[in-house]
Image (cartoon, grey):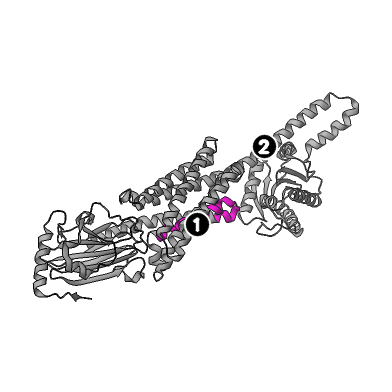
Amino acid sequence: MTRRLSYPLPAFVAFRWLALLLFFLPGHALAAVDVGTLRGELNLSPHVLLLEDRARELDIEQLLSHGDTLGWESSPQETLNFSFSDAAWWVQLRVENDTDADVRRLLELAMPLHDYLDGYVVDPQGEIVRQWKTGNRRNFDSRPVVHRTFVLPIHVPAGESRQVFLRLDTHDGLYDATPLYLMDDASFLAKAQRELMAFSLYFGAMLALLIYNLLLYLATRERPLLHYVAYLGTFFILMFSARGFAFQYWWPDMPTLNNQMIPLNIGLFAVTLAIFSESYLNLRLHAPRLTRVLYGLAGLCMVSALPALFGHYAAVFHLMIPGAILLSCLLLGVAVWRSLCGDTLARIYLVAWCVLLVGITLYFLRVAGVLPYNIVTEYAVQVGSGIEFLLLSLGLAWKINQFKNEKLAAERATLNLQRSLNERLEGEVAQRTRELEKANRQLTTMARTDPLTGLLNRRQFQELVEDELNRRRRSGQPLLFAVMDIDDFKLYNDTYGHHAGDEVLMRVSTLLLDHFRRAGDRLFRLGGEEFGLLLAVDSLEAGQLALEHYREALQQLRIPHEASTHGVITASFGLVACQGCAAVRDVETLYRLADKAMYEAKASDRNRVVTCSMVGKA
C-alpha cells in the first residue's frame, strides 16, 4: 500500500531544511549505502542509526514528521543485540543507486525468532512506497520472501535514493542478536544454498544417528540406547525450531505454538539429558544422592519453561539460564569425578559434554549480549552438538561391547576354575587309598560331563571329536557335526531369571538325549546355551532330517519366551558334513565351520538348520 504524508507547505519546507541540517551533524549523520554497485553481502550494522522507543508509541508518520530530533544514534555494534529490553527499537538506513539502471537488493534480518518486524521504504519526497508487517509471531505467509529468516526486497530506481525504516519489537522484552545484511539476488541465493546444504548435512546426520540407535535399541533392548534416542530427539526438534525450519515447514499458520515449542523443548532437553546421563554413567549405583540432585535441577528447568504456555518468555530465560548453568556444572563435575576414578565411559562423556558445553556457553553469552554475533557464536551449538552426539554414540557402542566382553571373561574364568579344580582333585585322588578309588572314578565322570545337563563337556568334545576325526580319515567314512545355540537366551535370562534359564537348559538337554540315542551319537554342552552334536549318520540329508525333527520337537515344547520373535524357546543349527575328513585339519576347524553355519541360521531369523559340506579325498 502506498501512502503520501501531507503537511502545510511552510511547515513541510522547514522540516526538510531542518532534516537536511541535522543530517550532517556529527553523531547523527547517516551515510548512504551505494547499492548500485553492491555485489556480495554487506553487514549493515555499522551503517544504520538506532532509536530506542521506550514507550513503544512511535509510528512511521511520527518518525518522518519529527526527523532527526528524536535522538537517533549510530550503531555501536557489528551485530545489533538489544538482549533483555522493554523498548521497541527503530533502525534507519539510507540507500542510493548512482547507476543508470533500476536495482533490487535484499535486506535480510538473519534471526528467525524475532517476534515483530515492521519495515518501510520511503522515497525522497516522504512517500512510503513499500511496507511490510511480519515476524515470528505472525503467520509465515506474512513474509515477502519465503525463507526461514526475514528477507525484504528493496527496489531503488536509477539515480535515486531510498530510506529504509525497521521497527523491531518483542512480545515481552526478550531480543536475540539481530544481524542485518544487504545483498543482491545472486549473493542471497548462494548464501541460502550454502546454509541449506550445511543444515541438511547437520540435521541429516542427527536423524541418521537417531534412527540407527532406535533400531539398535529394538534389536538389543539396551535401555541406555532408548535414553539416547529421547535425548537426541528433543535436541533435534529444539534445533529445528530454533533455526526457523519448523515454522516454515511444520506449522506455518501457528505462530503461538512455534514460540512455545522452543522453551518447552529446552526444558524437555534438560530432563532427557539428566535421564540419559544417569543411565550412561550408571550414577544410580555410583552416586545415588547426586542423582536426586541431578533430577531436581532438570525438573527446575522443565518448570521454568512452563510460563511459555501463558505467553511469558523473558521470564523463562531469566529462570532457566541459572538452572541450566547449575545442571551443566553438576554434570561436568560428575564426569570429571568418574573420569578420575578410571571410568572410560565417563572420559568419553566428559569430552563430549565439554564440546557441547562450550557451544551452549557461547550461545547464551551471545543472547545475554556479552559476546558479539558472528559465525562462531551463531553455529557453536550445532558444531558442538554434532561432535557430542557422535562421541556419545561411539561410547554407547563401547559400553555394549564391554558387557559382551565381561560375559565372555566370566565364562572363561569359570571354565579355567573348573579345569583347575578337576586337575587338583585328580591329583589328590591318585594319592588316596583303595577306599577312595570309587570316589575318584565318580570325580572323573563329573569331569567328563556338564553338571547341569549331564551332557559331555567342552573338554570331552575336544578329545572325542579328535579321535573320531582320526578314525574317519583312516576309514574314509563321512563325519557329520552340528552346533546348536538356543535363540535369544540372554533375553530369556533377563526376562525370567537365571534359575528359569537353567530349567530351560535341562529340558533342552533331556530332549537331545531322547532324540539322539544311536550308539555313535555324541552330545556336548560347549558353553552357555551352545551345544555340539556328533551324529552317527552317513549323509548330509539324513543329518539335516534328524536336526529338523529335533528343532520341531523343541518348538512343540512351547516353553514361553516373550522376548523372542517366535514367542517360545527355539534353537538355530549349523551342520557340516565332511566327506573323507581329509579337508579338516583339526577339531577347531570343524567347530568353526559348524559355528559359521549356525550364525547364518541366526542371521536368517533363527529357528532353522543351515548346512554346509566339505569334500576331501580320504
Q: Main secondary structure of the magenta part?
A: helix
Which residue is located at x 41 percent, y 68 percent? Answer: 256
From the top left corner, tell me how far across and down residue 76 is, in percent.
23, 51
Magenta-drawn stretch contains 549: no
The kind of secondary structure element at disc 1 is helix
Picture residue at 15% right of the left edge, 59% below the top:
32
Q: Amino acid at mark 1?
A: Met
Question: In the rendered view of the protein, which quadrant contains the C terminus?
Answer: top right
Q: How many marks?
A: 2
Image mark for residue 412: 2
Mark 2: few/some/many CA within 10 Å (<14, 14-19, 20+): few
Q: Is 45 placed left or right of 526 in the picture?
A: left
Task: State the image quarter where residue 557 is shown.
Answer: bottom right
Q: 571 or 305, which is in the foreground?
A: 305
In which quarter of the view is residue 83 placed? Answer: bottom left
Q: Is residue 509 visible?
A: yes
Mark pair 2, 1: CA separation:
47 Å
Q: Magenta span has 230? A: yes
Crowd rating for badge 1 (residues with CA inside 10 Å; few <14, some 14–19, many 20+)? many
Q: Secondary structure at mark 2?
A: helix
Residue 528 spot, x, y in % from top left: 70, 44
In the image: residue 497, left or right of residue 49? right
- At x 72%, y 33%, the residue is 417
Above or below residue 261? Residue 333 is above
Between 298 and 186, the one lying in front of the other is: 298
The residue segment tinted magenta is 215-241
Q: Quadrant of the N terminus?
A: bottom left
Q: Please give the label number shown on residue 302.
A: 1
Q: Amino acid at mark 2?
A: Arg
Residue 354 located left or right of residue 1: right
In front: mark 2 or mark 1? 1
Q: Residue furthest right?
A: 435
